[in-house]
Structure formats: C-alpha cells, structure tokens
Amino acid sequence: MKLTTANIVVFKQLLFGPRLPLDAIAARFKVTDRTVRRWRRKYQLFGGPFTPRSVMQGRPRLLTNTQRDVYAPTYLLGRY
C-alpha cells in the first residue's frame, strides 16, 4: 500500500484516536499487524511514517585524513 497524504491522515486518526485492535487497523490498510506496530513506533519516535535520512550516504573515502595530508602536497605539486 502506498502512503499517500490521505492514507496518512486516516492512519493517524485510527492509530491515535479511539483504541482499535491492531488487526482492525491492519485490515483497513491491508497490511500485517507488524507493519502497524512499526508505523506506530515511527510516529512516536520521529513524528511521521518515515525515518529521518541517514547522514552516512555515499561511498566511503579511499584515503584517510592522514593519508590525504601526506599525499596531497605531492599531488598538488605534480610529483606523483
């Protein structure tokens, strides 16, 4: 199921309104109880259905800071 704005609004009303059983909420959205528990936990922790982006993105550096400090001057001077 795709999380559209309308679905998120309905989900918040079901999740934080009158306490319905997890299986009733899961049946409404055609997902498992585990998914509903995961969504509830994300709302409580992050305030929305998605986790924040990780700062660790992209490829790791090939050189450490020490290696870069040692080799950068020779590379910039054309002695490589």
Image (cartoon, helix red, strand yellow):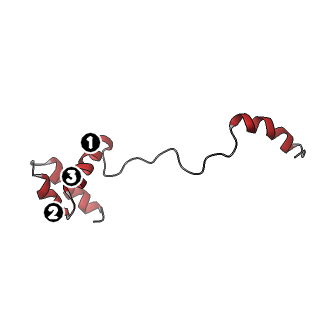
Q: Amino acid at mark 1?
A: Gln
For the point 25% across and 62% down, the residue is: 6
**Which is more toward the observer, 59 or 43?**
59
Is 78 on the left or on the right of 39, as rendered?
right
CA gap between label 2 and label 1 equals 21 Å
The amino acid sitting under disc 3 is Lys
Is disc 1 placed on a helix, strand or loop? Answer: helix
Q: Quadrant of residue 45?
A: top left
The image's mark for residue 12 is 3
Q: Residue 9 location, x and y as percent?
A: 23, 56
Tell me which label, 2 or 1, sits earlier in the chain.
2
Task: Give the quadrant of the N terminus.
Answer: bottom left
Q: Earlier in the sequence, mark 3 or mark 1?
A: 3
If you read the primary sequence from the N terminus, does the residue marked by circle 2 or circle 3 appear first? 3
- Residue beneath the point at 52% across and 45% down: 56
Q: Residues within 10 Å of mark 2 (few under 14, many from 20)?
A: few
Is there a contact, CB below 8 Å, between mark 2 and mark 3?
no
- The amino acid at mark 2 is Arg
The secondary structure type at the circle numbered 3 is helix
**Could you say where residue 20 lies in the image, as x and y percent from the top left?**
9, 51
- Residue 51's x, y, as percent? 37, 48
The image shows residue 1, relative to residue 11, as above or below, that is below
Residue found at x 24% / y 61%: 7
Give the spatial CA distance, label 3 vs label 1: 11 Å
Q: Residues within 10 Å of mark 3 (few under 14, many from 20)?
A: some
Point out which mark residue 44 bears.
1
Mark 1 neighbour density, 10 Å: few (under 14) some (14–19) many (20 or more): few
Query: Which residue does the image show at 10% across and 48% down from the upper left?
Result: 19
Residue assigned mark 2: 28
Q: Disc number at residue 76?
A: none
Q: Secondary structure at mark 2?
A: helix
**Cα–Cα span, label 2 and label 3:** 13 Å
